């Protein structure tokens, strides 16, 4: 393997250490960060994410409450729950777990969360601010992927970047974040005719499509950085399942200069970004209340 393996766990550990220090500072001011997770129905996948988020939150000193609602809850009822959490100063962040039942559109709930409590960075205002190069509570996965690239010895200004995948919460935000840092960005999607032409010209490639093995070593410029955001479960010949990304790791590792593993790459940094957002959201709310209720001089 020629590529240097990017240790997402080590990057996340540094972010968590910084978050713990900020949590202690906020607690001393009477603003202990608290997250509320909302899930609907009996969904095993969501339960796994909730357990992981709880464990990491508690490690950072952030209080974490998981609320699960029955599959029969209506959009109106759930919107009312979120409105109550928005108005509660003891709650500093709201997480909407996916998947949700078909009768509850996730975008409606993301819009319902107050932007100051949008620790997932999914509210249209949170994503829209990135267009103005005003990052506050950005979408966690996109921000995490960019943070990983920033740890590499690359000059991002003028860097040629290829983003494969143009989802609203990963691909597009990455493109705008990188442009905000001065990179030259090409975005590829399912209608792009020759993805390899663009990816081979790039100094850094982000891939977030949900197709295992999509990116191969032949699609990369030698020495390029590859940030693999995909998470796919595949079954081997012996029937055992394993988690892989969107890149064919073995062939890409022979060509790339740096590569993220799956798992252990973007995933841990995404969770750390969520907790950093929780700290930032708490600080923003503290400042908001201080201004709103300051005694007149």
Image: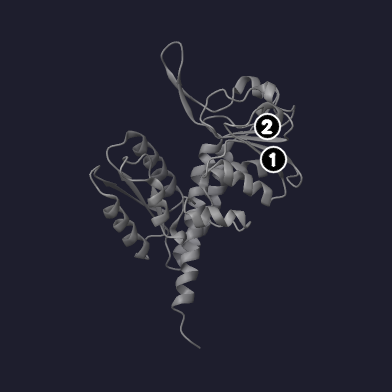
Label drawn at residue 217: none
Residue 134, percent across and down? 61, 58
Q: Residues within 10 Å of mark 2 (few under 14, many from 20)?
A: many
The answer to whether residue 20 of the structure is visible from this angle is: no
Q: Is residue 213 above or below residue 110?
A: above
Q: Residues within 10 Å of mark 1 (few under 14, many from 20)?
A: few
Residue 43, percent across and down? 31, 36
Q: Is residue 289 above or below residue 150?
A: below
Residue 22, percent across and down? 52, 58
Left or right placement of residue 132 versus residue 245 in this view: right
Q: Quadrant of residue 82?
A: bottom left
Of the image marks 1 and 2, the number of the one nearer the N terminus:
1
Label drawn at residue 152: 1
**Which residue lies under the disc numbered 2?**
258
The answer to whether residue 12 of the structure is visible from this angle is: yes
Q: Residue at x 73, y 28 (%)?
A: 221
Q: Residue at x 49, y 44 (%)?
A: 271
Q: Are marks 1 and 2 in contact (CB under 8 Å)?
A: yes
Q: Quadrant of residue 241?
A: top left
Residue 28, percent across and down? 46, 66
Q: Residue at x 26, y 49 (%)?
A: 74
Q: Nearer the viewer, residue 238 or 134?
A: 134
Which part of the image, by quadrant, shows the N terminus? top right
Left or right placement of residue 13 versus residue 61 in this view: right
């Amino acid at each position: 393997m020629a590529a240097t393996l990017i240790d997402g766990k080590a990057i996340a550990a540094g972010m968590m250490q910084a978050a713990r220090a900020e949590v202690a500072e906020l607690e001393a001011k009477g603003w202990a960060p608290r997250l509320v997770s909302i899930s609907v129905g009996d969904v095993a996948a969501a339960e796994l994410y909730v357990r992981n988020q709880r464990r990491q939150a508690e490690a950072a000193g952030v209080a974490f409450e998981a609320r699960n609602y029955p599959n029969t809850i209506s959009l109106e009822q759930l919107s009312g729950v979120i409105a109550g959490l928005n108005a509660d100063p003891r709650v500093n962040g709201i997480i909407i777990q996916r998947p949700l039942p078909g009768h509850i559109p996730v975008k409606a709930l993301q819009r319902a969360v107050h932007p100051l409590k949008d620790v997932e960075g999914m509210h249209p205002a949170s994503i829209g601010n990135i267009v103005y190069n005003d990052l506050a509570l950005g979408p966690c996965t996109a921000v995490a992927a960019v943070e990983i690239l920033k740890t590499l010895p690359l000059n991002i200004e003028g860097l040629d970047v290829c983003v494969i995948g143009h989802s609203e919460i990963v691909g597009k935000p990455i493109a705008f974040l990188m442009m905000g840092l001065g990179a030259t960005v090409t975005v590829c999607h399912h209608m792009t005719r020759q993805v390899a032409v663009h990816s081979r010209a790039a100094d850094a490639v982000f891939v977030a499509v949900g197709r295992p093995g999509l990116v191969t070593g032949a699609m990369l410029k030698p020495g390029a950085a590859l940030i693999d955001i995909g998470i796919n479960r595949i079954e081997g010949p012996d029937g055992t399942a394993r988690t892989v990304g969107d890149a064919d790791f073995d062939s890409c590792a022979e060509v790339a200069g740096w590569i993220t593993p799956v798992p252990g790459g973007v995933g841990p940094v995404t969770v750390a970004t969520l907790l950093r957002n929780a700290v930032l959201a708490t600080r923003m709310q503290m400042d908001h209340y201080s201004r709103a209720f300051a005694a007149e001089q």
